[in-house]
Amino acid sequence: GRPPSPPSSGWRSGRPAPLRQLLDRRGDGELRIARDLTRRPDEALEIATGATRRFAHLPRAWLDLAFVRRWREEPEEEISAADRAFELNPLWNPATLAFAGALERRGRFDEALAVYVRALSHSPHDGPVHVSHANLLRRLRRADEAFAAIQRALRLAPGDDLAWDFFT
């Protein structure tokens, strides 16, 4: 007959699988926010916090905690967790964008600009960070600086749709 089906994670079958089981299957403890978590915010926070204790030097653990905090509408805690991810690896684009974005959502624009500037000093060829930097500069009505930033982004990645969206 047929080979046996792989075990269902519960995601496709409509049944939520236990979160710990899903994380154990990945093997690295990485948390992914999925539809199962929307019904279990306390468990998501427990797992994400536990991951930061077990893997305190892993930026991904702190970024996952930041996403859980954002999802739980805890902005200061989100900023704190995203800051830790960024401090651990300022070259890592997801940490930069999460940290600066969290600051922007709280209206802390000068701090967000400083995050972009620091990240770009470490990694000047990061197109998405240039785009986000340009968008914030435009939002702050610093048109000349914004235009220069978006030009750098387009030189790095001429096919980047997000960079071209700057002009719409």
Image: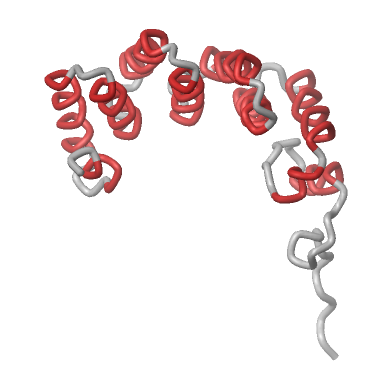
Identify the residue at horizontal 46%, vertical 25% (top origin).
Answer: 101
For the C terminus, the image quarter is top left
Task: Identify which residue, 146 or 125, lies in the foreground.
Answer: 146
- The colour scheme is secondary structure
Identify the residue at horizontal 64%, vertical 23% (top origin).
Answer: 62
Does residue 106 sit above or below 9 in this rendering?
above
Identify the residue at horizontal 81%, vertical 60% (top origin).
Answer: 10
Task: Identify which residue, 102 or 23, lies in the foreground.
Answer: 102
- Relative horizontal placement of residue 5, taking residue 141 as reference (left or right): right
Task: Identify which residue, 96 or 25, lies in the foreground.
Answer: 96
Q: How many marks?
A: 0
Residue farthest toward the bottom in the current orientation of the protein: 1
Residue 139: x and y in percent read 28, 24
- Relative horizontal placement of residue 116, taking residue 141 as reference (left or right): right
Does residue 163 sit above or below 112 in this rendering?
below
Residue 140: x and y in percent read 27, 18
Identify the residue at horizontal 74%, vertical 65% (top origin).
Answer: 12
- Relative horizontal placement of residue 161, taking residue 58 as reference (left or right): left
Residue 19: x and y in percent read 83, 44
For the N terminus, the image quarter is bottom right
Does residue 60 sit above or below 117 in this rendering?
below
Residue 93: x and y in percent read 44, 29
Residue farthest toward the left in the current orientation of the protein: 144
- Relative horizontal placement of residue 118, taking residue 28 as reference (left or right): left
